[in-house]
Image (cartoon, rainbow, N blue to C red):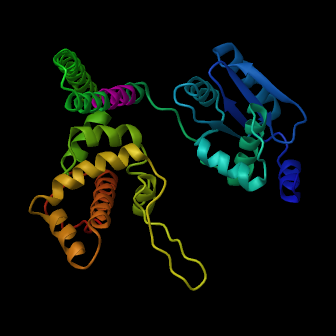
């Protein structure tokens, strides 16, 4: 163990915890503790953890994000008044590499998460509301059906056999019915929820942001209105990152972020640059100045997400010209 890790463990013993999430069990580490804990990923098991954390005075818990498997623990720990930060497994793995913890097991991952909480001090995250979770599940299901339709159409293009083609067309029609039903359920849910409906109307007032892009942003970019322009662009994976070394400047490129947001914004940007308007003019100007089309399109996508963040922050709809009392959006 390095001197830095040893100092962190001594100064923060018991104050930070890490939880590695599995389908059936939770592996838990209290920073600096000689023993680890494992409990079932169930309500009784999590209640045991809550009692343990309160008894030890745990200040912050780093919880591994694993799709639906971490949701119950996140909700119960949060309701018990404990600060919980949900951590992307990629970040915790990179942190482990930086610490020299190359071995991997559930117990080791829990210990790394506890150290991550102590040294990085991640911001606690509140669980999503019931309506938000329902909209997120519907959005994921719609995305999966849409991908299935695309796959089936490619299969149809590659076959000449009449029976196979007939079966594929039938499956496409069924998937399209399912997609339409999911979209209608999403519209009903947004219409029934005041906060979602209000934010949805703000987003769809922006040229280039339609139903799919707006619902994707509602579910996958909850930080809208709570982050600045640079932060929201980075969360969407649209902020160019420096790659300089010494006196040699590197080529800036986007990296990281949330791919579903980026995909949705890509479709909106492609729609906008084909039309007359500010986005199209901006894109064509960048291309004339020598930017590659893909780079120029990425810049349009960034402007879209920054504009959406600005409007949600200011609680107003898009207008061709910003109000006199409001500064122009970035």
Q: Residue visible at 19% across and 51% down?
A: 208
| Magenta highlight range | 135-146
Secondary structure mostly seen in the magenta stretch: helix
Q: Residue visible at 24% across and 79% down?
A: 289
User: Is 105 drawn above or below residue 262 in the view shown?
Assistant: above
Q: Nearer the viewer, residue 13 or 157?
A: 157
Q: How many numbered marks have been drawn onto this rendered protein structure?
A: 0
User: Is 310 drawn above or below residue 25 in the view shown?
Assistant: below
Residue 45, given in percent of the width and then of the height, sits at 71, 17
Q: Nearer the viewer, residue 169 or 223?
A: 169
Quarter where residue 23 is shown = top right
Quarter where residue 176 is shown = top left
Residue 36, given in percent of the width and then of the height, sits at 83, 30
User: Is 249 drawn above or below residue 304 in the view shown?
Assistant: below
Residue 81, given in percent of the width and then of the height, sits at 64, 32
Q: Residue visible at 86% across and 42% down?
A: 32
Residue 322 appears anywhere in the view? no
Residue 269 magenta: no
Q: Quadrant of the C terminus?
A: bottom left
Residue projecting furthest to the left: 276
Q: Nearer the viewer, residue 176 or 313?
A: 176
Residue projecting furthest to the bottom: 247
Residue 145 magenta: yes
Question: Would residue 123 appear left or right of 179 to someone viewing this image?
Answer: right
């Amino acid at each position: 163990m390095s001197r830095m890790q040893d100092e962190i463990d001594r100064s923060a013993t018991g104050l930070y915890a890490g939880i590695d999430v599995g389908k059936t069990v939770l592996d838990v580490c209290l920073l600096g503790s000689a023993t680890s804990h494992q409990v079932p990923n169930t309500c009784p098991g999590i209640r045991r953890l809550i009692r343990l954390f309160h008894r030890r005075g745990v200040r912050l818990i780093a919880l591994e994000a694993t799709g639906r498997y971490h949701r119950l623990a996140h909700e119960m720990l949060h309701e018990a008044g404990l600060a919980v930060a949900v951590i992307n497994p990629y970040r915790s793995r990179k942190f482990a590499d930086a610490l020299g913890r190359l071995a991997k097991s559930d117990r080791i991952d829990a210990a790394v998460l506890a150290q991550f909480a102590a040294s990085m001090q991640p911001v606690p995250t509140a669980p999503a509301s019931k309506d938000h979770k329902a909209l997120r599940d519907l959005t994921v299901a719609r995305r999966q059906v849409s991908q299935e339709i695309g796959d089936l159409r490619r299969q149809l293009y590659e076959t000449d056999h009449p029976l196979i083609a007939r079966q594929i067309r039938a499956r496409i029609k069924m998937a399209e019915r399912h997609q339409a039903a999911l979209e209608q359920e999403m519209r009903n849910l947004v219409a029934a929820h005041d906060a979602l409906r209000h934010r949805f109307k703000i987003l769809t007032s922006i040229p280039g942001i339609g139903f799919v892009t707006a619902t994707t942003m509602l579910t996958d970019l909850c930080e809208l209105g709570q982050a600045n322009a640079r932060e929201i662009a980075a969360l969407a994976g649209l902020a160019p990152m420096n790659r300089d070394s010494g006196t040699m400047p590197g080529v800036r490129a986007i990296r990281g972020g949330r791919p579903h947001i980026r995909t949705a914004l890509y479709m909106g940007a492609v729609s906008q640059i084909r039309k007359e308007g500010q986005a199209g003019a901006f894109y064509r100007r960048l291309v004339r100045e020598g930017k590659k089309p893909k780079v120029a399109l990425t810049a349009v996508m960034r402007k879209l997400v920054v504009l959406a963040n600005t409007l949600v922050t200011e609680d107003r709809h898009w207008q061709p010209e910003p109000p006199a009392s409001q500064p122009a959006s970035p």
